[in-house]
Image: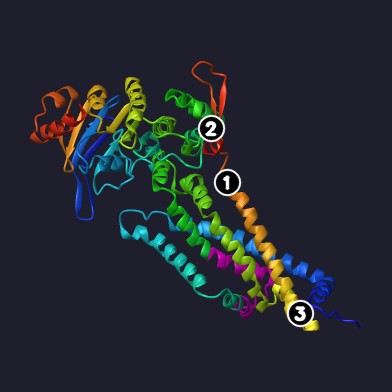
């Protein structure tokens, strides 16, 4: 058998032979990172909403249930931020096995990344909530909205817009850090690369390809998130309806033009 | 019967007592202006009335029923509207949406009715043309007029104004005061914390002068501005009117 001799020949050879493997690994990595980030975001939202419920006034016993919930959420955030994801995956996967639950690895992977991301997101979203001027929350309460209504309609849309860069960060981190899940044999990109490298012992060439794939993934994701941010900012222009002399007329005001 | 009765209201922040034994009534159609120097507790009083601050003690009766216990908080808040010094428009919504969201979420109105009502009040404050503009695209005076429309859309029985013109450039103060004058003329019940003495004198049916957390004097504007009885009121008016007129 004729084996390649130069670096680029090896890269071409490996791509040809293991292209499908790389592709499958990339697919699993993106699936785990995307669902982990989305579910983690939802967990973070819920945790942040609950953590910002104002404590009721009056007797201390009325505050006790909410205090207890706050305490548990703090424990969750501290534990999952304070331990490495690689250790969490071992504890959760083998811990579940110990009590007789044999999770499919892909499900375990998504679960672990989601819970881990949720702990970080809770803090990021809390920061986003603080960044929204608290007068708006007061105004929402002053027209009769409940805590939940004011959070969902007024505070969170703005908080989420403000933390979009951090959410993007989390997504990128998840694309890269899902590689630690290879310890529980999740068939993501790193795991697939390791098996591809093993056959011909071409670690450098294989992981060069792997690095390029990771870079393309993260770069594409950050660009897409930038576009999303722009979209969330809404239109820069608005229409003024009617005028003193002619109520049917309308004028479009374009902020960007004014600024330039 | 008065619609709002404040009885022995007190408020402390830690050791610092901001409101001391405040009692007064508001009847339908009253335009009550609260004046006094900074730190006298005017804003805190207003914020206690709609429970943005929890009163330390005392009771607030709305239509004879305890606002804290016998009324549902959200219902009471929708009936007692508030206009803030810093406008507090919802930054993620257009002027129209600012006026619609409360009607839909709190009063469960359908979208068409809510928008009709919103346009009616935006028209009233002269902001209908800007219905699609976001708060960041409006001037201070325009924002405050939208904020007033937002409060009116909830069909409140009383409107509380917390220094509505203090954050505005001088040339924008007039447009907001004019809207408030129109409301007063239309019979709206209003409780206004203000530093605009000529507005208070012309529009108010009654003036409360606060100092050090107590209501020092409670009079009609005609009496309070020409013949105040308390030395503290005299001193305050002398200082303020010297500057404003």
The residue singled out by tag 3 in the image is: A197
Query: What mark, if any, has residue A232 been given in the picture?
Result: 1
Answer whether residue A91 is magenta in the image. no
Task: Specify whether disc 2 shares its chain with disc 3.
Answer: no
Q: Residues within 10 Å of mark 2 (few under 14, many from 20)?
A: some
Q: Is residue A107 magenta?
A: yes
Of the image marks 3 and 1, the number of the one nearer the N terminus: 3
Q: Residue at x 47, y 33 (%)?
A: B99
Q: Which residues are the magenta region? A: A93-119
The residues tagged by marks 2 and 1 sit, at their Cα atoms, a distance apart of 16 Å
Q: Nearer the viewer, residue A14 or B60?
A: A14
**Residue at mark 2:** B132
Query: Which residue shows up at 49% across the image and 57% down it?
Result: A125
Quadrant position of the N terminus of chain B in the picture: top left
Residue A10 is left or right of residue A254, and the answer is right
Which mark, residue B55? none
Q: Residue furthest top?
A: A245
Q: Is residue B39 left or right of residue B170?
A: left
Magenta segment's dominant SS is helix
Q: CA distance from mark 3 to mark 1?
A: 43 Å
Q: Residue at x 62, y 80 (%)?
A: A98
Query: Visible in this render: residue A206?
Result: yes
Q: Are marks 2 and 1 on the same chain?
A: no
Is A226 drawn above or below residue A234 in the view shown? below
| Position of residue A222 measured from the top left corner of the image (x, y, whole percent) | 62, 58
Q: Is residue B145 left or right of residue B236?
A: right
Q: Is residue A45 above or below residue B131?
A: below
């Amino acid at each position: 058998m004729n084996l390649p001799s130069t670096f680029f020949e090896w890269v071409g050879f490996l791509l040809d032979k293991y292209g499908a493997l790389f592709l499958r690994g990339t697919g699993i990595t993106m699936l785990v990172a995307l669902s982990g980030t989305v579910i983690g975001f939802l967990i973070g939202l819920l945790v942040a909403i609950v953590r910002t419920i104002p404590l009721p006034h009056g007797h201390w016993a009325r505050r006790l249930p909410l205090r207890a919930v706050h305490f548990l959420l703090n424990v969750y955030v501290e534990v999952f931020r304070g331990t490495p994801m690689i250790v969490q995956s071992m504890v959760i996967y083998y811990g579940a096995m110990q009590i007789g639950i044999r999770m499919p690895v892909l499900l375990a992977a998504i679960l672990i990344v989601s819970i881990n991301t949720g702990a970080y997101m809770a803090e990021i979203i809390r920061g986003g909530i603080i960044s929204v001027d608290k007068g708006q929350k007061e105004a929402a309460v002053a027209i009769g909205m409940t805590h939940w209504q004011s959070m969902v309609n007024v505070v969170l849309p703005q908080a989420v817009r403000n933390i979009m860069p951090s959410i993007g960060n989390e997504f990128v981190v998840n694309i890269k850090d899902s590689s630690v899940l290879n310890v529980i044999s999740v068939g993501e990109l790193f795991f697939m690369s390791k098996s591809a490298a093993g056959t011909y012992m071409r670690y450098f060439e294989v992981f060069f390809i792997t690095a390029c794939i990771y870079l393309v993934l993260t770069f594409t994701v950050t660009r897409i998130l930038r576009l999303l941010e722009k979209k969330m900012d809404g239109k820069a222009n608005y229409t003024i309806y009617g005028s003193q002399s002619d109520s049917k007329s309308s004028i479009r005001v374009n902020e960007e033009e004014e600024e330039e | 019967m008065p619609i709002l009765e404040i009885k022995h209201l007190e408020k402390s922040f830690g050791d610092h007592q901001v409101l001391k034994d405040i009692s007064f009534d508001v009847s339908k159609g009253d335009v009550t202006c609260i004046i006094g120097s900074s730190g006298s507790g005017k804003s805190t009083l207003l914020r206690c009335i709609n429970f943005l601050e929890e009163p330390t003690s005392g009771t607030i009766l709305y239509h004879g029923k305890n606002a804290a216990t016998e009324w549902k908080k959200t219902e009471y808040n929708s009936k007692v509207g508030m206009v803030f010094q810093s406008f507090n428009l919802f930054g993620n919504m257009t002027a129209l949406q600012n006026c619609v969201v409360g009607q839909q979420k709190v009063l469960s109105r359908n979208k068409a009715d809510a928008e009709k009502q919103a346009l009616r009040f935006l028209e009233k404050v002269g902001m209908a043309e800007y219905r699609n503009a976001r708060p960041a695209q409006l001037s201070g005076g325009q924002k405050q007029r939208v904020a007033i429309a937002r409060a009116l859309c909830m069909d409140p029985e009383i409107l509380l104004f917390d220094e509505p013109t203090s954050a505005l450039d001088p040339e924008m103060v007039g447009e907001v005061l004019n809207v408030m004058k129109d409301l007063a003329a239309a019979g709206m019940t209003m409780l206004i914390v203000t530093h605009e003495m000529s507005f208070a004198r012309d529009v108010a049916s009654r003036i409360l002068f606060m100092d050090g957390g107590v209501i020092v004097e409670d009079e009609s504007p005609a009496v309070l501005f020409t013949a105040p009885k308390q030395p503290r009121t005299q001193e305050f008016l002398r200082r303020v009117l010297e500057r404003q007129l």
